[in-house]
Amino acid sequence: MTLRINDLLRGFAWTQSAFCRKYDFENYLATALINDSFMRRTAFAVRALNVELSQIRDLTTNETSAQMRFQFWLRLITDIFEGIEVPTASSGSQPIAAEIQKCFLASQKTLSKRWFLCLIESRMSSLNLSNFPFTTIKDLEVYIDSSVSPVFYIINEAARSVWMADRKTWSNIHLKLDHIGNHVSKAQGFSNILRGISHNAVRGRCYIPSELLVTHKLSVEQILRKTETKQMK
């Protein structure tokens, strides 16, 4: 029996959009403008997951606790994409997992597991869980490529499942979409780092690459103390 996309996607979509609206309002607005319902729901699901992952660092008290939480999501996503029964998803006790599972099935299993895992693995290394993880701008770019770009790649994959009826048109645009997504994600990633300076300073963290601090004659201590200087401005 063929299951229709609308049948598969009932349940938790509103929860994901509300979650994004509360914690990621700009992306909530952008995602709400997506016209196709399947693409929009997939976008909200992956953005909700990304918000959940981004909060682990703040909501855990040590690296071990954070690693356990990331491992939980690694197992969950792996099981979903390998077709293993996931009680927390099927029962709805974990709404984000439930929505990802439904979107994966509705896409005819064309969404890539690797991009979901990339979002998790990029955040769980000891280096990226440290208070001062980036030495060079290139280090930061690599992190953004694995922690922000996959969101756009997954949304593009959802678009592919919609456009597969017109394979010729899709073949002409999918590389362009990924290229655009890569550039947009870098811009978004850099702006997130700048906007998060004060938030992270309160928690004793600085994500500005040390080479950039040296270039502008700033110290980590000035960032953490939010010292008002000409260089800071």
Image (cartoon, rainbow, N blue to C red):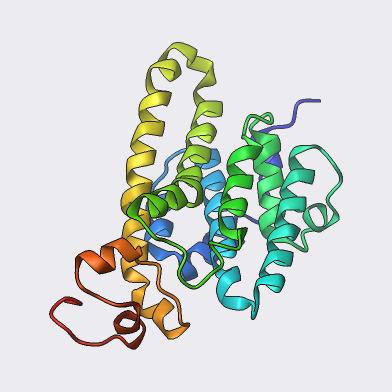
Residue 30 percent across, percent down from the top left: 37, 52
Examine the rendered structure and indicate whether residue 1 appears above or below residue 120.
above
Q: Quadrant of the C terminus?
A: bottom left
Q: Is residue 88 left or right of residue 22?
A: right
Q: Is residue 102 visible?
A: yes
Q: Residue at x 38, y 17 (%)?
A: 172
Q: Residue furthest top?
A: 168
Q: Is residue 11 visible?
A: no
Q: Quadrant of the N terminus?
A: top right
Q: Residue at x 45, y 42 (%)?
A: 152
Examine the rendered structure and indicate whether residue 147 appears above or below residue 222.
above
Q: Is residue 135 left or right of residue 230?
A: right
Q: Nearer the viewer, residue 126 or 40?
A: 126
Residue 66 percent across, percent down from the top left: 66, 69
**To which quarter of the image does residue 126 belong?**
bottom right
Q: Residue at x 69, y 31 (%)?
A: 109
Q: Nearer the viewer, residue 117 or 152?
A: 117
Q: Is residue 206 left or right of residue 99?
A: left
Q: Residue at x 37, y 55 (%)?
A: 189
Residue 107 percent across, percent down from the top left: 63, 32
Examine the rendered structure and indicate whether residue 26 appears above or below residue 221.
above
What is the total number of numbered labels drawn onto the structure image?
0
Q: Nearer the viewer, residue 4 or 81?
A: 81
Residue 60 percent across, percent down from the top left: 64, 77
Examine the rendered structure and indicate whether residue 182 appears above or below residue 89.
above
